[in-house]
Amino acid sequence: MDFFGEIVQIFGVPPSVGQIFGLLYASPVPLCFSDIFEQLDISKGSASQGLQLLRDLGAVHSVENGGEGRREYFEPELSLRQLVSGVLRERIAPMAAAGDERLARLRKLAEQDGSADEFYLDRVEQLETWRRRLKTVLPVLTTLLGPKRRK
């Protein structure tokens, strides 16, 4: 669980999210919400938010568990392809798409600066180049790493 907790922190995600994934990964049976927050000793709010993020990323999914009441049970996604695809789709793509306005503001500020305007304009152009490249490679990565088509 600590392993996954450390990995998600690299992406700025709370360690509890990784711990939830790690718990589900290490469990031989699907777990319900109460199992998760009790075994990890985290708040219900952290467990709820963590599960929602993991669902959004496609890192966990609900499963049937023998009709035990109304509880929802979860298990981890084990396909690296699916995990990477979810991160690209839910985290990287929106970030790449939202940069136009920010870069326009940076360019405007760089053009207004007196003595250092060439330096800042160069930096803004570099950011614009990185963003263009990311927008070019993102669809390719998404296609390559996207879900396998089931026959």
Image: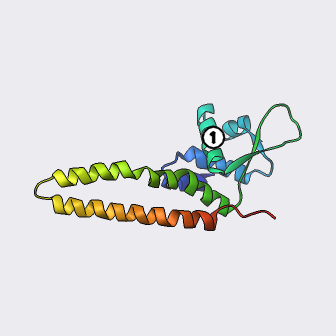
At horizontal 21% and vertical 54% (from top left) the residue drawn is 110
In this orientation, which residue lies closer to the viewer: 108 or 73? Answer: 108
| Residue at the left extreme, as displayed | 115
Q: Is residue 147 left or right of residue 120?
A: right
Tell how many labels. Answer: 1
In this orientation, which residue lies closer to the viewer: 31 or 123? Answer: 123
- Label 1 secondary element: helix
At horizontal 22% and vertical 50% (from top left) the residue drawn is 109
Above or below, 118 against 4 in this view is below
Above or below, 146 against 98 in this view is below
At horizontal 79% and vertical 34% (from top left) the residue drawn is 71
Q: Residue 14, image x and y in percent?
A: 52, 45
Q: Residue 93, image x and y in percent?
A: 51, 55
| Residue at the right extreme, as displayed | 66
| Colour scheme of the picture | rainbow
Q: Residue 34, image x and y in percent?
A: 72, 34
At horizontal 63% and vertical 51% (from top left) the residue drawn is 1
Above or below, 134 against 23 in this view is below
Q: Is residue 34 left or right of residue 137?
A: right
Q: Residue 35, image x and y in percent?
A: 73, 38
Q: Quadrant of residue 140?
A: bottom right
For the C terminus, give its image quadrant: bottom right
Dot 1: few (<14), some (14–19), or many (≥20) neighbours within 10 Å? some
Kind of residue at badge 1: Gln
Q: Is residue 20 left or right of residue 63?
A: left
Q: Which residue is mark 1?
A: 52
